[in-house]
Amino acid sequence: MASSSPLHVAVIGTGIVGASAAHFLAAAGARVTLLDASGPAAGATGASDGAVSVASKRPGPMMDLARHARAFYVRNEREGLFRGLFHRRSTFLIARTAIEADLVAQHGGDLAAAGERVVEIDRATLLKRIPGLGASVCAALEIPDDGHALGYEITERLLQRSRVSVRRNAPVSEIVMRAGRACGVAVRNEFLPADAVLVAAGIGSAPLLGLGEILLPRKGQMAVTDRATAGGPAIDGHLMAASYLAAKRGIVRDNSHIGLVIDPLMTGQFLIGGSREDHRGDHTTDAVTIAAILREALDLYPPLAGRRVLRSFAGVRTASRDGLPIVGLHPHRTGVVIATGFEGDGICLGPFMGASAARLLLGERPEADLSALSPQRFARVEAHV
């Protein structure tokens, strides 16, 4: 994106997607105003694990786009933008029952068909890699090309490098249209003119775009332990239980489902998650849910019994009605681009999707086919114009 665009773009939302879009728009010569109701990474970006994972994606467009997104991380780490923030790390898909083993095998076949390297690991070999795994673990696959990055660190780096200032505590109440085209936004009682608008505000995108029946909040509760090592990951990869895959593939739709992941952080701590609680937009945690998550984690990896939980927290992801993000040109509002609905995939997809949204605003073609994510698929958008 080497154009010298004269556009002034108002970017609503300073999570990982909005920060990425702002960075690449500014790099292309656009003037960018970043607006957030709170501040950078204050929403789902700051309350997520760091999985840059193809292994966790459901087959189809999400798996394919995750491969593009992970390659985007790799390229930007190599070229310096994400240096020191993105780390290559295997994902282990773990089964604890025969039914789960079948699910893991099916998912592994889908990953292989998408072009992923998939390595089948027997229990003895897995125990050499990750000593202490629970007696219930009966099958596993390794996806060796995945990675890890903390969303708030990526967001901070993007904002630093772009040198775009952020207007904090600036909730946008309206996208102002003139003759069918965006001409700016209203921030409380102030009108801010702009040539184009990017809406990357998570669940806050719904009232701005009339997507209240299409976007829904999905709360996830997590816990963080003390350090198992002085520095560096305590185990050799990200552990993802088959229960997480079941939720991603739509097999389980329990409103209080636990999709277990055990994430070894670079600090030597463990991040353990998480619940999937539909239509919950609060940030509270509760002892019942956290206890359920920890019981599952101890069954899969008993050495966690030696760790102390330092804190628990909750994040609110933005999910769409059909489970796919919404990314593309607004079908009826010229000059408006939407990038929301990433749910738990925002850390993996965010930088690439932000860059793709920037390309759309500049009239350029994204690096990947985003047609499956187009807002056009929701006919009800038309009723809210």
Image (cartoon, helix red, strand yellow):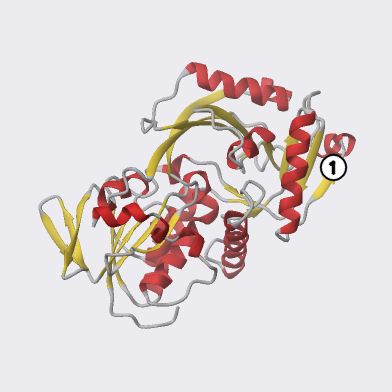
Q: Position of residue 162 (x, y in %)?
A: 39, 66
Q: Position of residue 279 (x, y in %)?
A: 39, 32
Q: Is residue 225 left or right of residue 381?
A: right
Q: Is residue 271 above or below residue 174?
A: above
Badge 1 is on which residue? 121
Image quadrant occupied by the C terminus: bottom left
Q: Position of residue 101 (x, y in %)?
A: 78, 35
Residue 30: tell me if it is visible. yes
Determine the residue located farthest toward the right in the rendered image.
124
Q: Position of residue 110 (x, y in %)?
A: 72, 52
Q: Is residue 280 left or right of residue 111?
A: left
Callout count: 1
Residue 263: tell me if it is visible. no
Rendered image quadrant of residue 113: bottom right
Q: Residues within 10 Å of mark 1 (few under 14, many from 20)?
A: some
Q: Is residue 133 above or below residue 93?
A: above
Image quadrant occupied by the N terminus: bottom left
Residue drawn at (69%, 35%), measured in percent from left and top? 242
Q: Is residue 242 left or right of residue 173?
A: right
Determine the residue located farthest toward the left in the rendered image.
189
Rendered image quadrant of residue 30: bottom left
**Label 1: which secondary element:** strand
Q: Is residue 158 above or below residue 302?
A: below
Q: Is residue 267 left or right of residue 328?
A: right
Residue drawn at (47%, 61%), measured in percent from left and top? 353
What's under tag 1, amino acid-wise? Answer: Ile
Residue drawn at (58%, 70%), measured in percent from left and top? 79
